[in-house]
């Protein structure tokens, strides 16, 4: 899976998490992607280790930074006392429209993890 396909899956997952009421902070995304890969077999290509609060991917930590650089995601800092919420941008919707086969192939897994 290439970088843009991975970005399409990540931003779709974030949108689905948010639509179901998730805070969608970095820890939520870390755990959701872990289950998406390890339990449901979506080959996003992130390496995980067992860390302080469960599975953690240092590769995925750089994911939001790359998504922000590409204008595919932004941070929402509105709630004091909590970390930022990860919010996909309108540009990410345009990217996802370019990868309908990738998203269709994994849509059931993404929906399952988000719910």
Image: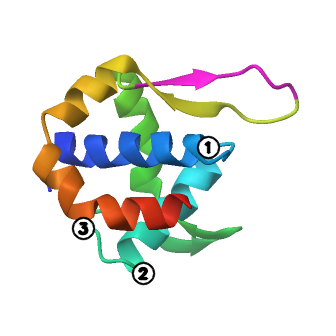
Label 2 sits on a secondary structure element that is loop
Residue at the disc numbered 2: 39
Look at the numbered disc 3 and give the secondary structure of its residue.
loop
Q: Which residue is label 3 attached to?
A: 43
Residue shown at 30%/59% (left/top)? Answer: 107
Residue plotted at (11% across, 51% down): 101
Residue 76 drawn above or below residue 105: above
Residues at marks 2 and 1 touching, judged by CB atoms closer than 8 Å: no
Is 95 on the left or on the right of 68, as rendered?
Answer: left
- Image quadrant holding the C terminus, namely bottom right
Position of residue 82 measured from the top left corner of the image (x, y, whole percent): 81, 36
Report whether residue 44 is seen.
no
Residues tagged 2 and 3 counted as in contact (Cβ below 8 A)? no
Report whether 57 appears left or right of 55: left
Of the pair 37 and 100, the residue shown nearer to us:
100
Numbered mark located on residue 66 in the image: none
């Amino acid at each position: 899976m290439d970088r843009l396909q991975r970005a399409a899956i990540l931003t779709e997952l974030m949108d689905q998490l948010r639509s179901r009421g998730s805070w969608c902070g970095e820890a939520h995304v870390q755990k959701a992607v872990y289950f998406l890969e390890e339990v449901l077999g979506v080959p996003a290509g992130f390496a995980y280790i067992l860390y302080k609060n469960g599975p953690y991917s240092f590769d995925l930590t750089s994911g939001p930074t790359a998504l922000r650089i590409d204008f595919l995601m932004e941070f929402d800092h509105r709630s004091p006392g909590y970390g930022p919420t990860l919010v996909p941008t309108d540009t990410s919707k345009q990217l996802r429209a370019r990868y309908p086969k990738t998203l269709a192939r994994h849509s059931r897994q993404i929906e399952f993890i988000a719910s």
